[in-house]
Image: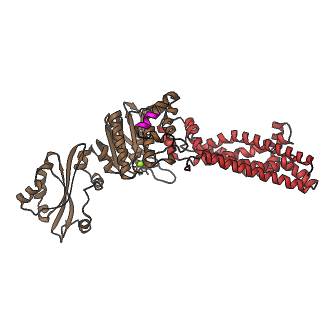
Amino acid sequence: MIRVESLSRIYPATAKSVAVTALKDVDIAVRRGEIYGVIGRSGAGKSTLLRAVNGLERPTSGRVLVDGVDIGALTDSDLRAERRKIGMIFQHFNLLSSRTAYDNVALPLEFAGVDRAVIRPRVEALLDLVGLSDKRDRYPVELSGGQKQRVGIARALATEPKVLLSDEATSALDPETTRSILALLAEINRTLGVTIMLITHEMAVVKDVATRVGVMEDGLLIEEGDVYDVVTRPRTDTARSFLGTLAGREIPPGLAARLRPSPEGTTTALIRLGFTGSRSTEPVISRLSRELGLDVAVLQGQVDEIGGRPFGTLIVSLPNAALADGSAERFLAHYDVATERLGHVA
Amino acid sequence: MSPELLRLILAATLDTLYMVAVSGLIGTLVGGPLGVFLATSGRGELFAAPTTNRVLGVVVNATRSTPFIILVVAIIPFTRLIAGTSIGTTAAIVPLTIAAAPFIARIVEAAIREVDQGLIEASQAMGATPFQIVRKVLVPEALPGITLGLTLTVVSLLANSAMVGAVGGGGLGDLGIRYGYQRFMPEVMAMVVLVLVVLVQGVQSLGETLAKRVNRRLRRP
Ligand SMILES: Nc1ncnc2c1ncn2[C@@H]1O[C@H](COP(=O)(O)OP(=O)(O)OP(=O)(O)O)[C@@H](O)[C@H]1O
Ligand SMILES: [Mg+2]
């Protein structure tokens, strides 16, 4: 649905700043009807990427195709028409303070020159969809953050787009409101079949709604895959660091304070284990302990699921020796358990 | 005070209101679009035309930094060309308008620049044309600021219109100079000042009330 082909964007140097390469040769294919998450730290180039999809940003090289249409090759007026097929929501909502919820949702239809008689039922249906029928005549100042974002979502859907772009749409919201907005996005994806590309710096957001995820760093797409695979078996340190914020993945704080990078002067090693698929139900730990004769202590554990597929995370301690000769990790790999060394404690 | 004097004051007040209304109206018709253009024609903006923007900016600043009384005298030939005369109420409208338009332009420009850039981006993402963005987004969002600015303009027009009285412009200023000063009738001078104070107060409160009414950023009680 969205094809990003070797996309680069260089902001040229100005009198005050040097040139910035915001995107380097990025390739992404977002499939029809999926929710694709892009995660990355501040300045990684996420917004630049998203803005290239609806032509707010002109690529330096490469191209973006949305439903087969080359966005960069359109004339101004064709681009405007194309943008009506691509909705967008924002971190700070970007609602007009001078318009009520109803009039904000009606705005893109007014831009499109749609008849008032057509606008009315459509806007009312959209307000109903996002659960704000009772706030129809309220101004943004009278709405909570979550309600404002619902208006933003209704507005983005007004022209019945095929694609919805979301730039940190939940970053200004509290965790509970975030979940309700994500649930709404998932529902829209499911019931209207809208393809969603969403940008975030929180793995929890990706894990809650996305089917696939791309990890960006310094303008590069450094890792990509099904959310389940990236969460359970991250391949890059960046991806791993985003997992750190997910529940059940933290090292207990008392231990974290005593953790050392080298085994010198310590006796025990900490590793994080990732269980996936059917193996997650096998008694791997007791076998590890029995067959290798190791003392294994479980320090932290969590079972979760992504898209109905379960996965488990355990933080365990082992004798240093079992790590030094690699025997424990070999054994675990045999059972398809992902391992990650965390450090050593005395 | 004699009824005749009162009639003179009433006529002068009407003259003043006429000058202020017409020059305010034409000033807004010229200065409003000019302000919108100034606010949207910088580098990389909606109607990007950086050179024109800079030239117009200089012209606007030049007009604004010329003391009004000098402006009045300097453009007498132009005034005569437009109004057919350089004396009287109608003639006074020319310099008043020329002073008001750049003032309004700057006020409108400032109010529009206050509008969140994110709204322009959101509108573009919705497929709006630059003109639609101005008409449906920028101007409505800037309306509280513009309303307050126009209030300020009318107040300064009142002051300027009194000043054109010194050079035969008609209205309250003219009356004050001719009767209050030259014929030494302090009660006329006092009346003129009083009427001007009342007018300024009235305009100010009206403007503030309107601005509050169009401002949706404030929570309603
Ligand atoms: N208009 C611009 N001119 C110059 N440099 C820019 C411009 N916009 C973005 N950049 C630079 O491009 C890089 C990528 O910016 P971008 O906004 O895409 O990052 P991001 O991943 O969205 O970050 P954040 O999470 O903070 O929103 C940054 O280094 C930024 O400073
Ligand atoms: Mg960003």
Q: Can residue A24 be seen in this view?
A: no
* Position of the N terminus of chain A by quadrant: top left
The kind of secondary structure the magenta stretch mainly shows is helix
What residue appears at the point 82 percent right and 54 percent down from the top-left corner? B193
Above or below, B41 against A201 in this view is above
Please state the horizontal and vertical placement of residue A94, each as a whole percent of the image. Answer: 48, 45
The quarter of the picture where residue A244 lies is bottom left
Number of numbered discs: 0
- Chain drawn in brown: A
x 66%, y 41%: residue: B32
Which residue appears farthest toward the bottom when viewing the image?
Answer: A265
Q: What stretch is highlighted in magenta?
A: A123-128
Question: Left of A340 or right of it: where is B205?
Answer: right
Magenta-colored stretch includes residue A125 = yes
Residue sitting farthest toward the right: B183
**Quadrant location, the C terminus of chain A:** bottom left
User: Which residue does the image show at 70% across and 50% down from the upper left?
Assistant: B205
Q: Position of residue B188 (x, y in %)?
A: 89, 53
* Rendering coords of residue B38 (x, y %): 62, 44
Q: In the figure, the red chain has which letter?
A: B
Q: Where is residue A48 in the image (x, y as percent from the top left)?
A: 41, 45
